[in-house]
Amino acid sequence: MSEEFVFFLYDIATYLLNGITQGSIYALIALGYTMVYGIIKLINFAHGEFYMIGAFIGFYLITSGMPFVPALLIAMIGSGLVAVLIEWIVYRPIRSAGRISALITALGTSLFFQYAGQRVLGADPKAFPQAIKVKTYQIGEIYITNTQIIIFVSTILLMIFLWWLVNKTKIGKAMRATSFDMKAAQLMGINTNQIISFTFFVGAAFAGAAGVLVGLYYNTVEPMMGMIPGLKAFVAAVLGGIGIIPGAVIGGLVLGIAENLVVGLWVSTYRDAIAFAILILILLFKPAGILGENKKEKV
Amino acid sequence: MDYFLYLTQMCGIFMILAMGLNLINGLCGQFSLGHAGFWAVGAYTGAAFSVFTNLPLPGFIILLIACLLGFITAAIAGLIIGIPCLRLRGDYLAIATLGFGEIIRIIFMNMDSVGGPRGFTDIPKLSNLFWVYFFVVLSIIFCANLIRGGYGRAIISIREDEIAAESMGIQTFKYKTLAFCIGAGMAGLAGVLFAHTTQFISPNNFTFMWSVIILLMIILGGLGSISGAIIGAVILTLLPELLRLLGPTVSEWRMVIYSVLLILLMLAKPTGILGKKEITFSFGKKEKA
């Protein structure tokens, strides 16, 4: 092997590593998208804003001196509660009015948080405090930071928790039942409203966690930060098969890795285009996503 | 006064955009979130034509040629995007078009010949109130006649029930593509007028948010109604500006108020202001769209 080729391999490994880090973040946000869509068939465009809210709660807590782990947990609970409140005030009354109205309401909510955030929190990006001292480890020519490891480990822990929650607990069973058939679930005595609130809570808590982790990784937070990651997480959810929980994880990772490879090996200005190009290719050739099954429409 | 004139022209431009999207979304029932992409195609084509060719012709003839070119290129873009995408349905179509809209914007961002991220400057000011409203009236007449004719009936039948329409012998794919192309072409036309009104365009004028705002216009007015689209366009263009007039505090919070009003309206009247009804000038005669 020539020396250049070895360096090329090291480069690829670095991009893969960055891709996995970013992909974990997308996956965390995409989980909430996919769970909410799975239950009430609503594309919750405000989901990216829960991520922003989580990041800001984390920012204020860590600035005031709280250690990282409790700040992360409180940020998760905080953005979860905001989501429950929004679901209760806005989405619940609109649920019966049809899907387009619900979608527009979601977009309105997203706009509200972006602009209110700019007014209340200030439009300028804020420097996220260094909650954990950055250490860089070196393996050959590959560099990996401890923040990357933290992001990756917390993502895996959260996903194991979610898997346990959905598959092994009573409330998880109720969630699956509600997403399978809401009316039947209601007839079986499940309080579907409560389950929907709970789903919003869990989804937004995961997005909030992603927000704090991103703050740690990129060191800045700002009120408009939720928009692009929100859209991309949605792409990730569709990529994996919307409504399918493992699909969101796979979609997030594929998207993160693909983006970083394109940025590294080609041009960085096409970074955002690549996410959408992948989305369109998937939709055209496998519309139900990587893990989804194609359904024929019946009359 | 100049500002007032500018706002009136912007209202007209958004009316054309809203009517185009109304054709795709309101009449044909195909949920598109990429309208700003076609707007961008038209704006850049028209601007490139009038800046680069620099023909020794009177201004309005250049504008008319630019409008024609903008319409055609945006309609072709609609065809290229519509043929693969229109096989998808509902939410999936919405995100595919969203993706294409963003890709178009990013391509313009990377085209150095038209300014790239810095934007396209020095576009001649060829458009004025007359030409904007000339095309508004033309679009209204076109849309109203389309709805009453055979093509329009076929397009509406797809919205009502695609499978039933297909079993009645309507070539649904052909009519969907047709509605999509015309809607995209109208967005292109609006783009040309926009570029020659503001004299400056940049890829950031055509973000996903604008596709959403155009969608809001037609939903606010009543999905599927031409007069609804016009009312929605006027309200959503003027509302942020009116809020600006109500003192400094309101002005600072105007985008927040705007979004709250939007949510409240959706909660109070999810079908929009007019529903599917039309305002017509022949009183006593009920129009059915």
Image (spheres, coloured by chain):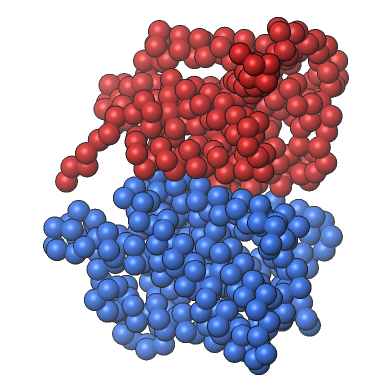
Give residue B52's position: percent from left, percent from top: 67, 75
The quarter holding residue B156 reads bottom left
Chain ID for blue:
B
Give residue B112's position: percent from left, percent from top: 70, 57
Residue in the picture at 19% in, 60% down? B165
Quarter of the image where the C terminus of chain B is located:
bottom left
Query: Left or right: A164 with respect to A256?
Result: left
Residue in the picture at 13% in, 58% down? B167
Residue in the picture at 60% in, 29% down? A261
Which of B77/B262 is in front? B77
Which of A126/B240 is in front? A126
Q: Is residue A163 above or below residue A114?
A: above
Q: Is residue B158 visible?
A: no
Quarter of the image where the N terminus of chain B is located:
bottom right
Which of B248/A118 is in front? A118
The quarter holding residue A190 reads top left
Residue in the picture at 83% in, 41% down? A124
Q: Identify the residue at the far bottom of this view.
A: B58
Q: Is residue B95 above or below residue A177?
A: below
Q: Identify the residue at the far left of this view.
A: B168
Q: Is residue B169 above or below residue B64?
A: above
Chain ID for red:
A
Query: Left or right: B65 with respect to B271?
Result: right
Give residue B238's position: percent from left, percent from top: 66, 69
Q: Is residue B109 visible?
A: yes
Q: Identify the residue at the far front of this view.
A: A2
Give residue B42's position: percent from left, percent from top: 56, 69
Number of numbered discs on residues: 0
Q: Is residue A163 above or below residue A49?
A: above
